[in-house]
Image (spheres, rainbow, N blue to C red):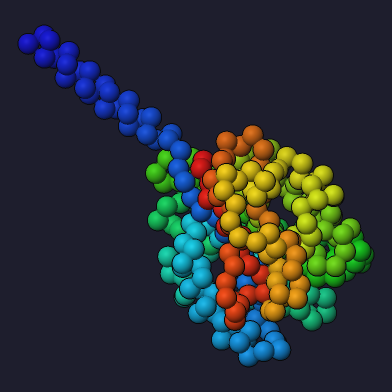
Amino acid sequence: MKKLFCVISCLVFNFFAIGQEGASDSFHMKVMSYNVRRKGKEKLPESLWDNRKERLAERIRIANPDIIGMQEPTKKQMEDLRQLLPAYTSIGLGRGSSWLGAGTNEYNPIFYKPAFFQKLASGTFHINATKGIWTPFNWRKTGALPRICTWAKFKNKNSGKEFYVYNTHLDNKYDSAREHGAKVIRKKMGNRHPIILMGDFNAGFTNYLQTTFNNFDHARTQAKLVVGPETTRTGWADEELKQIDHILIQKNSGIKVLKYEVVQEDRPYSSDHRPAIVELEL
């Protein structure tokens, strides 16, 4: 009887020990960065938002990412995307209209699957603002349009592990404005850890961007498997091939990059950018 009690006690102890160990187990997830092209005038009818939104949503559904950082969607596009992608919840505020109201209120939203992740905190901040207000007083430093960054802290519901995601869209014209925006983001991050940073940087991950984000590695360079072309910006007819959309992984974060992919699709394109996707282990 004494031996039986010992056996049962050992089994119960092992059961709870396994449960506790399982709570800290690593998990896999897929993260996408995608400039979806703002709604507006286009040269070709096939490039208009209403004619391509279903293609774009299907592209996302096929890739099936767990978290998506988008760039450029307007308020109307956000409404469409929420309806077309019901498995996701979105985070983020618009940037406000541009100087003299000439631009559209674009977002840098983060879409995530609430079935797998709990949002613990989030926010959107300007990266070229003074005291919270954007003013075009120095375009070479701040850029001619208001720019923002959306961030969120998530908890994986299965493993309990927590992590941060930052999503941004840097200035499209001036290196100095891009560098300024990058420095604001780096400062806002503080000592948070671990972080996944993504977005349309409108530049390669070199020089001042690599210096500013020197605590990050490009996911492509860390991936065990790389698939697809290097370039992410295409234009509508491959006339603007550039690598300007990036996913960065904080160094010494414990995040492993299993796969990096730039998704190439047949024309007509869903956007003038290709989505970049990483499969990660945390």
Residue 40 visible in image? yes
Q: Position of residue 9 (x, y in %)?
A: 20, 18
The residue lying toward the viewer, choosing from 218 and 108, is 218
Q: Tell me what residue is drawn at x 65 percent, y 61 percent.
A: 229
- Horizontal relation, residue 162 to residue 75: left or right: left
Q: Position of residue 115 (x, y in %)?
A: 40, 56
Would residue 33 be visible to someone looking at this image? no
Q: Position of residue 75 (x, y in %)?
A: 61, 76
Q: Residue furthest top?
A: 2
The correct choice, above or below, for 58 with respect to 155 in the image is below
Q: Please determine whether, in this image, residue 51 is positioned above or below residue 183.
A: below
Q: Give me the residue at 51% from left, 53% from top.
A: 30
- Asked where in the image residue 195 lies, by quadrant, the reply is top right
**Location of residue 274 (image quadrant):** bottom right
Seen at 73% across and 61% down, the residue is 243
Count the labels in the image: 0
**Quadrant in which the N terminus appears:** top left
